[in-house]
Amino acid sequence: MTIAAPLTDPDADGLPEPEATATAAPDPAPEPTPDTSAPDTIVSGADSVREDITERSQTLGDILAQLDRVAIAVGDWRISAFDLLFAAVAALLVLAFALVATRLTRSALKRLTGLDDTQRVLTEKIAQIVIWVTTFFLAIDLLGIDLTALAVFSGAFGLAIGFGLQKTFGNLISGIILLMDKSIKPGDVIAVADQSGQQTFGQIRKIGIRAISVVTRDEREYLIPNENLMINQVENWSYSSKNVRIQVKVGVSYDADMTLAEKLMLEAAAKAGRVLDTPPPTVWWNDFGDNSVNFTIHCWINDPEEGVGNVRSAVLKNLWALFKENGIEIPFPQRDINLRDNAQMQALIAALEGRPAPIGDDSE
């Protein structure tokens, strides 16, 4: 016989009641708040300056606030009248700093006696580059300009600068290289060819960022790009030595005493004021010309910046006086004229002599 077990009451004591689990409702998503902030100003450094001035003087702060309200907003950019005023004042300050620093650097370099002219100019140029680069970044920092805002235009701007200033940077680097190797330096005398191809000489007065200044004896000033001196042939009369040899060509008659003439040529060259005694003047026989025996007087000077034409003129002037004193003839071209004998010629001769012309046939 099977006895059935009693059914258990779920509400009876001693049995745990099932726990009720409640899930909390999710919080509603916050509603987006509209962006009421003002657009970014291009010159962000002006805001901090304006706030600092306002803390010090309420009157000036109110004036600057009025200027700041007059503004133009383009997209996320905003520029006001105060921003423009602040940028102008900051630009003037940094330019004044650069100019004063450049003048102080130039004055300090002039006092350094241990540097020659080339080293002084090279140091001055490098100092100017450092000063102006520092001035540029100082202005950027003072204005608070965010350069990343110009990232969109940086590629095109850099390309335009690369093509537009290619020659400028080329001349700048060429000038620095010329000063470093001392092939061209202020005070050198170089030969210069003008547009017509005629060559003259001049002294280098200044080596600038773009070009060098060459002054000729007639006070004409040539501005030659530095890059041209790097790629073209340059005749430098004072590169390693300032001694320059001058050639004076002279012609003497075939009937003259050549030994005496040569002696007088040497004497005329020695009397010239700027001609050096060492090396001494020399005389070369060039050739036997149609009308004269041709010589060349070679003499040396060590101050080519004072000119060479005046030395040649002094030698020839002295030689003319010596030749006159010693009876040395300087020949000149002579021509013989042959006249044909005919009736017209006889009539002309008779007329000149004052007698009647011969009567006869006019033909030969």
Image (tube, rainbow, N blue to C red):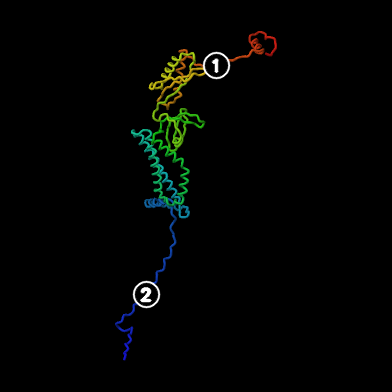
* Residue extending furthest toward the left: 14
Q: Amino acid at mark 2?
A: Ala
Camera-near label (1 vs 2) is 1
Q: Is residue 37 above or below residue 343?
A: below
Q: Is residue 236 above or below residue 342?
A: below
Q: Secondary structure at mark 2?
A: loop
122 vs 364, left or right, is left
Q: Residue at x 50, y 17 (%)?
A: 292
* Image quadrant in which you'd find residue 131: top left
Residue 339, given in percent of the width and then of the height, sits at 62, 14
Judging by the rendered image, the residue that carries numbered circle 1 is 334
Q: Which mark is residue 212?
A: none
In three-dimensional space, the C-alpha distance between marks 1 and 2, rounded to whole angstroms, equals: 138 Å
Judging by the rendered image, the residue that carries numbered circle 2 is 22
Q: Amino acid at mark 1?
A: Gln
The answer to which of 164 and 104 lies nearer the viewer is: 164
